């Protein structure tokens, strides 16, 4: 080993040692690591804890804070969940939300894959400008878009149906998914495509047999984001759906479980808790792919 490389290694070791010196003592670890981590975990998990205890609280404990603690429950009950599942249209809302989210995500991913591949890999004139315009389209607020979209939905005749949501959700899903996949496709080496072209592969074969298998983490990440946005969308679902049986969970819980100034807090929190479980399960199953897509793709 040369003297220069040995000196560089020693300097690097000293830098790492000085960087970790802040964790040498327990007070420093508490102040710089444990305390910020505890605050972050508390802020992140407290809403779910509040939903859980409110969903299982008896009605007399929901407002009687002088006798019962608001942060704990005595004698938990499942009456609110039973009421939500068997005396309201919540199972139908849950099914509608699932169908709309899955179909919208599939359509958005299909269109985004073609758009991102064309912009990043074919290198046509104006590709960068096109990519920028697609990203800017994502920044347009839905509160502005739903007015012209409502006119189109009425003219087509799909108002108050799931097709209205399935066909309008991709208007904000496609720009975001395209922008995300563009960044992922950019990290895949061009030499792979050049080798496939030399071997006589077509663009369709390159996309389906070379690029997409390598872009699975990016596709899963874009799919998770699209599914989450579709699952939680409120404005379009509130505008384009009027009948109770066609509503989604975000709209149905708010419009059907709030009657004037009467808030059914137990059922509301039960609906919010059950409605968040599919997204939590989705993230837990694909968290490795999600992290992989955020940290990098194929290395040359």
Image (tube, rainbow, N blue to C red):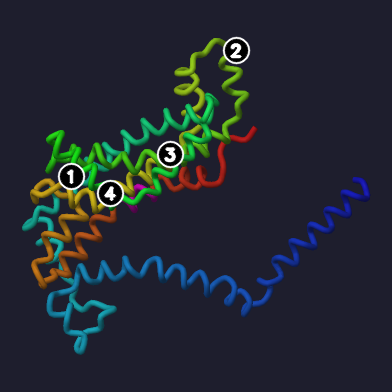
Q: Quadrant of the N terminus?
A: top right
First along the sequence among labels 4 and 2: 2
Q: CA distance from mark 2 to mark 3?
A: 32 Å
Structural crowding at the residue carrying mark 4, measured as other residues with C-alpha within 10 Å and reported as few (<14), some (14–19) or many (≥20): many
Q: Which residue is mark 3?
A: 134
What residue is rendered at 15% in x and 62% in y?
81
- Location of residue 246 in the rendering, given as x and y in whole percent from the top left corner: 12, 46
Q: Marks 4/3: CA distance?
A: 22 Å
- State which tag comes first along the sequence, 4 or 3: 3
Of label 3 and label 1, which has the lower sequence position? 1
Camera sees residue 278 = no
In this view, the mark in front (4 or 3): 3
**Which mark is first along the chain, 1 or 4?**
1
Residue annotated with mark 4: 231
The furthest residue to the top:
200
Q: Main secondary structure of the magenta part?
A: helix
Residues drawn in magenta: 278-284
Position of 34 relative to 123 (above/below): below
* Disc number placed over residue 96 in the picture, else none: 1
Q: State the residue lying farthest toward the bottom.
A: 66
Marks 4 and 1 in Cβ contact (< 8 Å) = no
Label 3 to label 1: alpha-carbon separation: 29 Å
Which residue is identified by label 2? 198
């Amino acid at each position: 080993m040369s003297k220069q490389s040995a000196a560089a290694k020693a300097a690097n070791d000293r830098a790492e040692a000085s960087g970790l010196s802040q964790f040498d003592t327990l007070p420093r670890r508490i102040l710089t690591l444990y305390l910020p981590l505890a605050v972050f975990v508390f802020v992140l998990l407290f809403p779910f804890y509040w939903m859980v205890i409110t969903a299982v609280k008896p009605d007399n404990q929901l407002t009687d804070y002088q006798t019962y603690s608001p942060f704990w429950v005595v004698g938990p009950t499942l009456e609110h969940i039973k009421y939500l599942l068997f005396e309201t249209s919540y199972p139908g809302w849950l099914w509608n939300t699932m169908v709309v989210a899955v179909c919208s995500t599939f359509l958005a991913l299909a269109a985004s894959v073609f758009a991102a591949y064309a912009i990043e890999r074919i290198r046509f004139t104006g590709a960068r400008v096109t990519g920028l315009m697609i990203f800017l389209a994502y920044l347009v607020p839905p509160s502005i878009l739903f007015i012209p979209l409502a006119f189109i939905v009425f003219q087509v005749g799909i108002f108050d149906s799931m097709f209205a949501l399935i066909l309008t959700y991709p208007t904000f899903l496609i720009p975001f998914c395209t922008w995300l996949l563009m960044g992922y496709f950019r990290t895949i080496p061009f030499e792979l495509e050049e080798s496939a072209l030399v071997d006589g592969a077509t663009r369709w074969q390159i996309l389906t047999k070379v690029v997409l298998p390598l872009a699975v983490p990016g596709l899963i990440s874009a799919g998770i984001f699209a599914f989450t946005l579709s699952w939680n969308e409120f404005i379009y679902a509130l505008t384009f759906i009027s009948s109770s049986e066609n509503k989604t969970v975000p709209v149905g819980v708010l419009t059907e479980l709030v009657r004037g100034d009467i808030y059914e807090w137990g059922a509301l929190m039960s609906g919010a808790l059950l409605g968040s479980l599919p997204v939590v399960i989705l993230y837990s199953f694909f968290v490795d792919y999600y992290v992989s897509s955020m940290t990098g793709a194929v290395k040359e």
